C-alpha cells in the first residue's frame, strides 16, 4: 500500500481540492482522489458570487465569464434588469475544478485518478479502496465527493429526499450577446437560469426533489430556452432541431433547519466538506462558496484543533444556512396574494432600496439573517 498519508480526501471538486491545497501548504501529506472521468464536468450552473471572488481572488485566474448585469423574470413574466456593483463569475466546472486540482498538486498534494469506492478503519488508520483494487492509507479521512457521497452516507447518515433539491438542464451554443437570466418558476418552487460561460450557455432548473415533475419542468425549460434564443418553437423536440443541446442533471442538498441542527459533519478521524456535508443555500442551491469556506475552516481546524471544525462552520456560516432553510418556503410561497418572487421583482422595479438589496443578495453580500430588517429599513429610507 505504500506510505501512510496524513489525510485522504475523496472528491476533487472545489471543496476537496482547496482543502488539499491548504493542508499540503501547511506540511501535511495529502492523497486526493479524483474519480470523475477525465474531461467530464460536474452538472452545475457554475456561478461564483462576488463575495467568493473577494475572499479568494485567485479564482479569477481560472477561465470564466464575468457578469455585471442580470435579468430577472417574475413568475408572471415581469422583467427587471439589474446592474451589479461588483461582477460575479460563471465557470465551466471542468475549468474551475481542473484549476483548483492543479493548485493542490503544485502545493504538494498527490492526486489519484481513481474512483474511491470503499473504506475501512484499522486502529488509527483508514484504508480507502478504489474499484481498480488500489488502496491508500491515511490517518484522517475527508469526504468531499458531492451530495450523493456514499462515504458521507456511511460516516454521517443518509440525507433524506425531503432535504434534497434537483437541478437539470442543457448546455447550448453561445449567442452573439449572451445574457444572464434568472426566471422564477410559475407554480413550482425554484427557478430557471441561463448562465453564459466562455464557450457555451448553461440552461437549467433547480427545484425541490419532493415536487419534482420532470415532464412538466422539462417542457417549461425548453420553452425558456426557445425564448432565450428568440425562437418561436415550444413543442418538445423543436429546440434541439434548431439548437444542439447537451443534457445534464444533479442532486443538490437543501437541508431543513432541523436537519442542519442534528447533522454531524465530523467525528473521530473524519470530516465532511461542501455538498457531502449538506452545505448549500436552500433558497438558491448555490454551494461553491460554502465548499471553499468549509475547506478553509477544516484546514484551520486540522492544523490547530481537529475537533473544532464542527463549531467553526456553525459559527461562521451555520446561522445563514439555517435562516435560509427557514425562509425557503416563504421565499417561494405567497405574499400579498402573489408569489413572493413576484412581489419582490415588482417592488425592486419601483424602489431603489429594494433593488439595492436584491443586487447584494445576488452578490452574496446580503445574508438571510438580517434580510427582513434591511428590506424594511431601505424601503422607508432608501438612501440608508
Image (cartoon, helix red, strand yellow):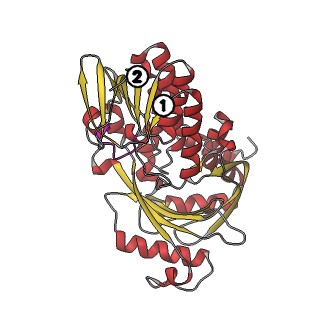
Label 1, secondary structure: give it. Answer: strand
State the predominant SS element of the stretch in magenta: loop
Position of residue 207 in the picture relative to residue 347 (left or right): left
Q: Which residues make up the magenta segment?
A: 145-152
Q: Mark 2 falls on what kind of element?
A: strand
Front residue of this view, candidates 81 and 113: 113
Q: Which residue is mark 2?
A: 5
Give the crowd class for mark 2: few <14, some 14-19, many >=20 residues within 10 Å. some
The first of marks 2 and 1 along the sequence is 2
Residue pointed to by mark 1? 110
Question: Would you say residue 151 sits in the magenta stretch?
Answer: yes
Q: Image point 66% across, 40% down: which residue?
A: 53
Q: Are marks 2 and 1 in contact (CB under 8 Å)?
A: yes
Residue 255 highlighted magenta (yes or no) = no
State whether residue 317 appears in this view. Answer: no
11 and 267: which is toward the camera: 11
Amino acid at each position: 500500500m505504500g506510505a501512510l498519508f496524513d489525510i485522504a480526501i475523496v472528491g476533487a471538486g472545489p471543496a476537496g481540492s482547496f482543502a488539499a491545497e491548504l493542508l499540503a501548504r501547511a506540511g501535511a501529506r495529502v492523497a486526493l482522489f479524483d474519480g470523475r472521468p477525465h474531461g467530464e464536468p460536474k452538472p452545475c450552473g457554475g456561478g461564483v458570487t462576488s463575495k467568493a471572488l473577494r475572499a479568494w481572488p485567485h479564482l479569477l485566474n481560472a477561465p470564466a465569464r464575468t457578469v455585471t448585469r442580470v435579468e430577472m423574470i417574475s413568475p408572471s413574466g415581469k422583467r427587471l434588469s439589474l446592474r451589479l456593483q461588483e461582477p460575479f463569475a460563471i465557470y465551466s466546472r471542468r475549468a474551475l475544478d481542473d484549476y483548483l486540482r492543479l493548485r493542490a498538486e503544485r502545493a504538494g498534494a498527490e492526486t489519484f485518478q481513481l474512483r474511491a469506492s470503499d473504506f475501512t478503519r484499522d486502529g488509527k488508520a483508514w484504508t480507502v479502496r478504489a474499484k481498480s483494487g488500489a488502496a491508500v492509507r491515511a490517518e484522517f479521512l475527508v469526504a468531499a465527493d458531492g451530495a450523493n457521497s456514499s462515504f458521507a452516507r456511511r460516516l454521517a447518515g443518509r440525507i433524506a429526499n425531503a432535504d434534497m433539491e434537483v437541478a437539470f438542464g442543457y448546455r447550448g451554443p453561445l449567442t452573439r450577446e449572451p445574457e444572464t437570466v434568472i426566471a422564477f418558476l410559475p407554480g413550482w418552487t425554484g427557478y430557471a437560469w441561463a448562465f453564459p460561460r466562455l464557450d457555451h450557455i448553461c440552461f437549467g432548473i433547480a427545484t425541490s426533489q419532493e415536487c419534482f415533475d420532470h415532464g412538466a419542468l422539462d417542457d417549461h425549460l425548453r420553452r425558456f430556452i426557445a425564448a432565450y434564443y428568440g425562437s418561436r418553437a415550444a413543442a418538445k423536440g423543436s429546440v434541439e432541431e434548431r439548437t444542439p443541446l447537451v443534457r445534464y442533471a444533479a442532486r443538490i442538498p437543501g437541508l431543513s433547519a432541523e436537519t442542519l441542527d442534528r447533522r454531524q459533519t465530523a467525528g473521530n478521524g473524519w470530516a465532511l466538506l461542501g455538498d457531502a456535508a449538506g452545505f448549500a443555500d436552500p433558497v438558491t442551491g448555490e454551494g461553491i462558496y460554502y465548499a471553499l469556506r468549509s475547506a478553509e475552516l477544516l484546514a484551520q481546524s486540522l492544523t490547530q484543533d481537529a475537533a473544532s471544525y464542527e463549531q467553526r462552520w456553525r459559527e461562521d456560516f451555520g446561522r445563514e444556512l439555517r435562516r435560509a432553510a427557514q425562509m425557503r418556503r416563504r421565499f417561494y410561497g405567497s405574499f400579498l396574494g402573489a408569489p413572493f418572487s413576484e412581489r419582490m421583482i415588482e417592488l425592486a422595479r419601483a424602489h431603489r432600496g429594494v433593488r439595492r438589496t436584491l443586487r447584494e443578495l445576488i452578490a452574496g453580500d446580503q445574508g438571510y439573517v438580517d434580510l427582513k430588517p434591511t428590506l424594511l429599513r431601505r424601503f422607508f429610507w432608501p438612501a440608508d
